């Protein structure tokens, strides 16, 4: 299922489409993975269970963020090494990224299971939500490593010119998750624990398919044995630090979603209580999906940008960036309009109209969706900076966006606007981040004109 893709010479628009369609399709099925899980939990177990999943979601997002960091960081470095005629080093980079991230998450899984009560307390879990949240943790935390691998392996399969293979693995994982969700929740009556197990089983099958591809020595990108000598371990540590440095903005982008959920949960539960958290959870089911779609657009451009960066072909780098930004902005406008128009049907997918969370969700979703357009600019810009190894800019935008602008908005905006201000906190943070991004672009252009920029910069 390898595609005919030449990152260095093919027309940029055609090349981008070849990467985009299967990558977006893969993300769409991952989105269905999440949405269907939420629908089954809301309809089959109840709004408290939906709120409990939102309470625990930061733990799941932490695992996927490790996968994104390993995948993005490893893929950027591997892309540059392939462009420079060093495929054996690219394979070592990939194997190190996947193995070290998996080992780290195995340790984290054990710690979360041992200290479950402490983790739930830190996440702001109320007594009413404690039991369903605990069951959900027991169902998915043992498989956090698998969830991360489902994210990270896709980067390297796409780099090996096989985006359709990665898409197929995601499709199979999603279909199995839907089947298992129905069986475990509605037939076996396993409740929220069944939903967690369904997600884990679907991920296991998807990862098995991905690893089957990466285990074939006939593929350019395949797993290789790692040496365990002192010298080899020293080089591996250096490589892992570099991979983490490149991939850290992806990690932080995912972690900021967890921070957004955590802050929103605290603010909603203090203003409205559990119904507010349940309503917010509906928005939170969609926010990571929007992030994944924007991220898939950035990921589609990443091997094109990184490869041409490696051979110093700047016009192709700039062209790929512009195309990805336009695609994301179109999606942002459509998402905002669709959420505003279909807010009631969207809410009814998760909860019934007589639920206390229903009017809160219906009134709040359009306000929350206002941030989807500037969010597009921010995520594509972060991905671009990573692809050309401008980690400093990517880090600055990511940290200020998630830990200063959005968190600060949650603390300030609701004081003036009440409950609508809670919904508008994320859009406010995204707008501030976009202002920062445009400021970086303006400074970069100024330095370019005066010959002060030595590396590739954004247009």
Image (cartoon, grey):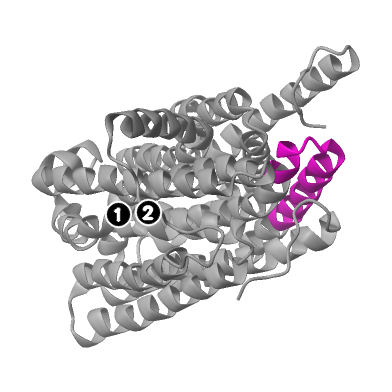
Residue 7: tell me if it is visible. Answer: yes
Q: Nearer the viewer, residue 75 or 180?
A: 75
> In the displayed image of the protein, which residue is found farthest to the bottom?
187
Q: Position of residue 325 (x, y in %)?
A: 75, 46
Assign the C terminus to one quadrant of the image. top right
The residue tagged 2 is: 148
Q: Position of residue 306 (x, y in %)?
A: 68, 42
User: Distance of mark 1 from mark 2, alpha carbons?
Assistant: 5 Å
Q: Residue at x 76, y 63 (%)?
A: 17
Q: Residue at x 68, y 41 (%)?
A: 84
Quadrant in the picture for residue 104: top left
Assign the N terminus to one quadrant of the image. bottom right
Quadrant in the picture for residue 384: top right
Q: Left or right of 74: which side holds 76?
A: right
Q: Left or right of 56: which side holds 436?
A: right
Total marks in image: 2
Residue 310 among magenta residues: yes
Q: Residue at x 28, y 50 (%)?
A: 56
Write down the region rendered in magenta.
306-333
Q: Nearer the viewer, residue 181 or 380?
A: 380
Q: Position of residue 78 (x, y in %)?
A: 56, 45
Position of 286 relative to 205 (above/below): above
Q: Left or right of 180: which side holds 247?
A: right
Q: Position of residue 194 (x, y in %)?
A: 22, 73
Marks 1 & 2, CB-CB < 8 Å contact: yes
């Amino acid at each position: 299922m390898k595609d005919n893709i030449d990152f260095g010479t093919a027309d940029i628009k055609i090349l981008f489409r070849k990467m985009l369609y299967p990558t977006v399709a893969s993300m769409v099925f991952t989105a269905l993975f999440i949405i269907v899980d939420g629908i089954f939990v809301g309809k089959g177990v109840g709004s408290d269970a939906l709120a409990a999943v939102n309470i625990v979601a930061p733990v799941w997002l932490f695992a996927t963020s490790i996968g994104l960091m390993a995948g993005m960081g490893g893929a950027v470095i591997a892309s540059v090494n392939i462009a420079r005629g060093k495929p054996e080093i690219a394979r070592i980079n990939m194997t190190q990224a996947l193995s070290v991230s998996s080992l780290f998450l195995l340790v984290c899984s054990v710690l979360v299971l041992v200290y479950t009560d402490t983790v739930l307390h830190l996440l702001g879990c109320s007594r009413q939500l404690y039991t369903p949240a605990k069951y959900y943790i027991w169902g998915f935390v043992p498989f956090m490593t698998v969830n991360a691998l489902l994210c990270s392996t896709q980067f390297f399969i796409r780099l090996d010119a096989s985006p359709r293979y990665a898409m197929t693995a995601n499709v199979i994982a999603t279909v199995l998750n839907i089947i298992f969700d129905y069986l475990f929740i509605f037939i076996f009556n396993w409740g929220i624990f069944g939903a967690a197990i369904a997600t884990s089983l679907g991920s296991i099958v998807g990862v098995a398919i991905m690893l089957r591809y990466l285990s074939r020595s006939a593929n350019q990108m395949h797993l290789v044995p790692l040496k365990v000598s002192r010298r080899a371990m020293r080089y591996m540590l250096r490589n892992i630090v570099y991979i983490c440095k490149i991939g850290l903005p992806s990690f932080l982008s995912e972690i900021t979603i967890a921070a957004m959920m955590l802050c929103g949960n605290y603010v909603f539960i203090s203003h409205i209580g559990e119904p507010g958290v349940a309503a917010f959870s509906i928005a939170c089911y969609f926010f990571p999906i929007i992030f994944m779609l924007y991220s898939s657009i950035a990921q589609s451009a990443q091997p094109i940008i990184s490869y041409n960066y490696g051979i110093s072909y700047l016009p192709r780098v700039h062209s790929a960036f512009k195309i990805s930004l336009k695609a994301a902005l179109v999606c942002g406008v459509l998402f905002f309009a669709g959420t505003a128009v279909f807010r009631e049907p969207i809410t009814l997918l998760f909860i019934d109209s007589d639920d206390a969370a229903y009017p809160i969700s219906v009134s709040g979703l359009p306000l929350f969706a206002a941030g989807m357009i500037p969010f597009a600019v921010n995520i594509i810009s972060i991905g671009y900076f990573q692809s050309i190894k401008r980690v400093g800019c990517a880090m600055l935008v990511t940290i200020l966006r998630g830990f200063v602008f959005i968190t600060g908005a949650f603390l300030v905006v609701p004081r003036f606007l009440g409950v609508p201000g809670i919904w508008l906190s994320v859009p406010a943070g995204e707008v501030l981040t976009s202002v920062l991004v445009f400021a970086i672009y303006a400074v970069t252009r100024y330095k370019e004109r005066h010959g002060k920029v030595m590396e590739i910069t954004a247009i």
